[in-house]
Amino acid sequence: MRPLRYSINVTLDGCCHHEAGLPPDEDSMRYWTAEMERADALLFGRVTYQMMEAAWRKPATGTWPDWMDEWQTPFAETIDRAKKYVVSSTLNGVDWNAEQVRGDLGHAVQRLKQEPGEGLWVGGVTLPLALADLGLIDEYEFLVQPVLAGHGPTLLAGLRERIQLELVDRHEFRSGVLALRYRPMRGDS
């Protein structure tokens, strides 16, 4: 069974708004590119899908926009070509190499996890909370930003039950960002 990995940027005070942390730099973009490359598919809710599509879908001209620095191109190309699953009951359809997921979330994600491959990647705020509550996330990765936001949505706010995690990897960036990877502790631990 392929694992479901949840990755997100978060400030020291738990804010997970996408603009609350440090601006992306070459280090972090290389890291995120590698994360996208090790996933068979990306799993998004409607809001995250639309936000990512607006920023990272290759324009019809075939040329990346002028605002994009050269070091952002590998990430853009990786996410642009990635297979995507979009959980939404309000969208009428999706494209951008995407397939819409409808119906029972738990059953749908279990089916995706049972397919062969290296793993699924999920980002965002609302969908990961539902997946965590269902016990479907196999790995949590937080890129902890050395910032105190003082406002905004907080990470996994409203989680129904406490999830005990064990640290399995860490990486420190020159910027002071820490990538911390955890797995849920199973059983009586």
Image (cartoon, rainbow, N blue to C red):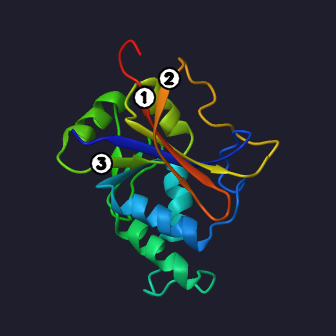
Name the amino acid type tagged 2. Ile
Res 42 visible: yes
Question: Could you say which is closer to the camera, residue 177 or residue 77?
Answer: 177
Name the amino acid type tagged 3. Gly
CA gap, disc 1 to disc 3?
16 Å
Identify residue for label 1.
184
Q: Position of residue 143 (x, y in %)?
A: 58, 50
Task: State the residue at coordinates (33%, 48%).
Answer: 120
Res 104 visible: no
Name the amino acid type tagged 1. Pro
CB within 8 Å, label 1 to label 3: no
Identify residue for label 3.
119
Is 148 displayed left or right of 181 in the figure?
Answer: right
- Height in image: 36 above or below 65? above
N-terminal of the two: label 1 or label 2? 2
Residue 150, labelled with which disc? none
Question: Could you say which is closer to the camera, residue 32 or residue 42?
Answer: 32
Task: State the residue at coordinates (46%, 29%).
Answer: 132
Crowding at label 2, few (<14), some or many (≥20) Cα neighbours within 10 Å? some
Which structural element holds mark 3? loop
Which structural element holds mark 2? loop
CA gap, disc 2 to disc 3?
21 Å
Identify residue for label 2.
163
CB within 8 Å, label 1 to label 2: yes
In the figure, residue 87 lies in which quadrant? top left
Crowding at label 1, few (<14), some or many (≥20) Cα neighbours within 10 Å? some
In the figure, residue 101 lies in which quadrant? top left
Is 56 displayed left or right of 155 in the figure?
Answer: left
Task: State the residue at coordinates (32%, 54%).
Answer: 41
Which structural element holds mark 1? strand
